Amino acid sequence: MTAYRISYTWCGIKQDAEDIAQEVFVNLARRLKTFRQKSSFTTWLYRIVINTTKDFTRKCATKHAYESAFALEHKPENPQPSQVHHHAARRLHKELAKLPEKQRMAIVLVLGEGLSHREAAHVLSCPEATVSWRIFQGRKKLKKSLEHMR
């Protein structure tokens, strides 16, 4: 697990993901005394990464809305293949961001991080069946929204 990978999957912006990863380790250092070993260290660390990522993205939501509007207004006429790939990835992140938070986090942990449904359930403090349902619903919504893009 890397803090960067989770935060990048969550927000889709490289610079923000780097900032979040740094903030995660600052938070980890601050909270290390509070680790009570009720769960594994990795599970506890995932919670710190998730909470730090959500807090950071809430703070930056308005800033990115303005930046996105500006970028859409200044698109290149004939995008290069790498720009097309980048655009597709950005679009996927944008659609992922539209999912309800619980569905998005289940998808990030299981599909992005490779956790089992059981491990994700432990991190998210919910039953394994709930994680499975959230992923199922999230995939369905993503598929529908991405099909409308074609």
Image: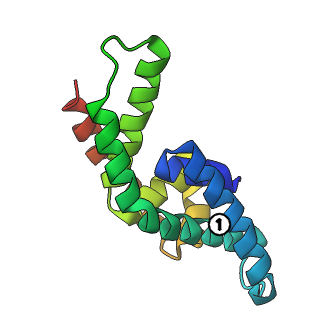
The answer to whether residue 129 is seen in the rendering is no
Count residues near mark 1 (Cα–Cα under 10 Å), then give few for <14, some for 14-19, many for 20+.
many
Circle 1: element type: helix
Q: Is residue 1 above or below residue 76?
A: below
Q: Percent position (x, y) of residue 127?
A: 48, 72
Residue 23 lies left or right of residue 132; in this view the side is right
Q: In this picture, is 134 found above or below 48? A: above
Measuring 56% from the left and 63% from the top, which residue is drawn there?
A: 120
Which amino acid lies under the numbered mark 1 shown in the image of this protein?
Answer: Tyr
Q: Which residue is denoted by mark 1 in the rendering?
A: 46
Q: Residue at x 59, y 47 (%)?
A: 15
Give coordinates of residue 21: x percent, y percent: 67, 58
Looking at the image, residue 9 sits to the left or right of residue 84; the answer is right
Query: 77 and 112: which one is in front?
Result: 77
Residue found 49% across the figure and 45% down from its top: 12
Color style of the picture: rainbow
Q: Is residue 82 left or right of residue 37?
A: left
